[in-house]
Amino acid sequence: MVERQRQQGRRHAHGRSGVFTAVALAGVAGAVAMCCGCGVTGGAVADDHGSAGATAAVRDAAGTLVTAGSARAATSMEMAVGGTRVTIRGEGGYDFRKRMGSLTLTLPEDPAGSSEHRPITELLSPSLLYMKNRGAGVPADKWVRVDSATLGDGNLVTGGATDPLTAAELLRTAARVTYVGTGTLAGTTVRHYRGVADLDAAGRQAAPYARSALAAAVKGRGFASKAVPFDAYVDDAGRLRKVRQRFSYLNQGSPVTVASTTVLYEFGSPVSVKLPPAGDIYAGRIKD
């Protein structure tokens, strides 16, 4: 059963992608795949799925995840690069109480069809992002450490995956929320909601740990629009099972839609994250 859910979680996170670029210091820009159809069907909206109830269900998702403790995560990030859609996929786990996680990112193949890049290991912490196998002149045994608040997009897309809890924190600003329908995701009944989040408001309203990164996204020049359309899927316990957020990202001055998707499953799974010691942090110049 566990293996079937893991495989379904991966399928729902597959799709389109992001591109490996040297934006600021982090260098992985991208976009994540839309999940395959979840079997969600529309229909008459029940009274408890009206505007107020739908908005509350989405805005409460971050707090419910903290109560849940931890989960496995599958991510994808997608955007078009030079007329070609590429995908960065990630898989790992996240501890919502410690606000820490670990993801292994698989980069897209080169145009010739062969894979040139080793998977990147990312360690997520409340304010810092650690990356191993970053490439671009970084020794293989060293980590790159980046303060999310120093990035023009708050590391919402630069790292190739959106921090799962930060993605949920962004939903605290959900507006114009509508109930789309009920369906199943990885064998679990979910309610599908659609709306728009607001980066400006998130920089003020998010939990303290995410506020500095989201505020950096507001102040920086990484986004063409502070409006973030989303699709969110919530289970009967109020836990966020999937969220797809579409960011209007500036790539060399031109707006590009970056779709970031996170699927959460196997809630309660143990997640252990050990941050690298100072001696393993690369302090040299990172090449483009």
Image (cartoon, helix red, strand yellow):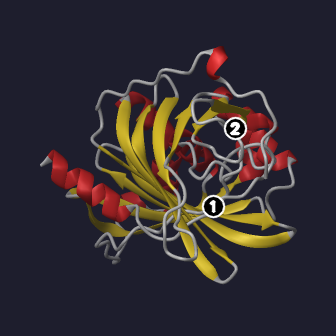
The residue at the far left in this view is: 1
Out of 74 and 105, give the one closest to the viewer. Answer: 105
- Left or right of 131? Residue 225 is right
Left of 156 or right of it: where is 245? left
The amino acid at mark 1 is: Gly
Q: Quadrant of residue 190?
A: bottom left
* Residue at position x 58%, y 76% in the image: 111
The label shown at residue 205 is: 2
Q: Quadrant of residue 213?
A: top right
**Image spot of residue 110 (x, y percent):** 57, 70
Task: Give the number of the mark in front: 1 or 2.
Answer: 1
Task: State how far apart marks 1 and 2 are (Cα).
Answer: 26 Å
Judging depth in this view, the residue of 208 and 115 nearest the camera is: 115
Question: Looking at numbered disc 2 in the image, what kind of residue is underneath it?
Answer: Gln
Residue that numbered label 1 is attached to:
30
Is residue 177 in view from this perspective?
A: no
User: Tag 1's secondary structure?
Assistant: loop
Q: Earlier in the sequence, mark 1 or mark 2?
A: 1
Q: Is residue 227 left or right of residue 94?
A: right
Residue 266 higher or lower than 157, as above or below: above
